[in-house]
Image (spheres, rainbow, N blue to C red):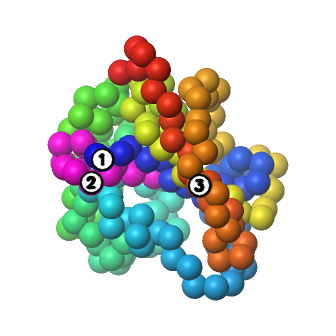
Amino acid sequence: MSLTQYSAATSLDGFIADENDSLDWLFAVATTGDEDRFAPFLTEVGALAMGAATYRWVLRAEGVLEAPEKWKDWYGERPCWVFTHQDLPTIPGANIQFVHGDVRPVHATMSDAAGQKNIWLVGGGNLVGQFVDHGLVDEVILGYAPVTLGAGAQVLPRRLTTDLDLQEAVIVNAAFVEVRYRIKRRSGDS
């Protein structure tokens, strides 16, 4: 059964980016060991979605427009939907759809494209909140970094009234704690 998963790194105080939309704080965290939980996660992903701020960060911070092969190195041929109300540059050779509006019909299209694989909601928190509002998220997977930011983009700027079942909590690379929650479905969820 395929799942729709929100997976992101967060500070201890619940921010996925600082007040300047930067992830420099995340890459500054020293890690030890070689446990790679991302590669196995990504093999199960058939489609992904992200918001405009996340997409712009990838373009800016990783220089993907100048080196478009980076996108394929990271995401392969997986289709990606970018939710935006702005015109954004396209990465040559990447399978990207720019969309806006209601997440429900886009989720249905993503599910078809993913087949039996999972959908990864990369970020940001507001976009993921829209999926949560319509009962479309199955799991929330957060990697807590030993950092506090005090301000920035919240991991999920919504009150989550849906019940969460803790599935797993593990130490990763001696610095992060990764938690995986399954969202309980209630009658009436779309």
Residue situated in front as seen by the camera: 166 or 188: 166
Give the amino acid at mark 3: Glu
**Distance between the Cα atoms at labels 1 and 3?**
18 Å
Answer with left or right where residue 49 lies relative to residue 117.
right
The reply to whether discs 1 and 2 touch (Cβ–Cβ < 8 Å) is yes
Identify the residue shown where x is 25% and y is 29%.
Answer: 105
Answer with left or right where residue 9 lies relative to residue 75.
right
The part of the chain drawn in magenta is: 110-124
* Residue matched to label 3: 168
Identify the residue shown where x is 47% and y is 69%.
Answer: 38
Q: Earlier in the sequence, mark 1 or mark 3?
A: 1
Q: Where is 161 relative to 66, above or below?
A: above
- Residue 96 lies in the magenta-colored region: no
Q: Earlier in the sequence, mark 3 or mark 2?
A: 2
In the drawing, what numbered circle is on residue 2?
Answer: 1
Give coordinates of residue 11: x percent, y percent: 72, 56
Identify the element where label 1 is drawn: loop
- Assess disc 3: are there few (<14), some (14-19) or many (≥20) residues with their C-alpha within 10 Å of its C-alpha: few
- Assess disc 1: are there few (<14), some (14-19) or many (≥20) residues with their C-alpha within 10 Å of its C-alpha: some
Identify the residue shown where x is 43% and y is 37%.
Answer: 137
Give the amino acid at mark 1: Ser
In the drawing, what numbered circle is on residue 26?
Answer: none
**Distance between the Cα atoms at labels 1 and 2?**
5 Å
* Residue matched to label 2: 117
Identify the residue shown where x is 59% and y is 29%.
Answer: 163
Quadrant of the image occupied by residue 33: bottom right
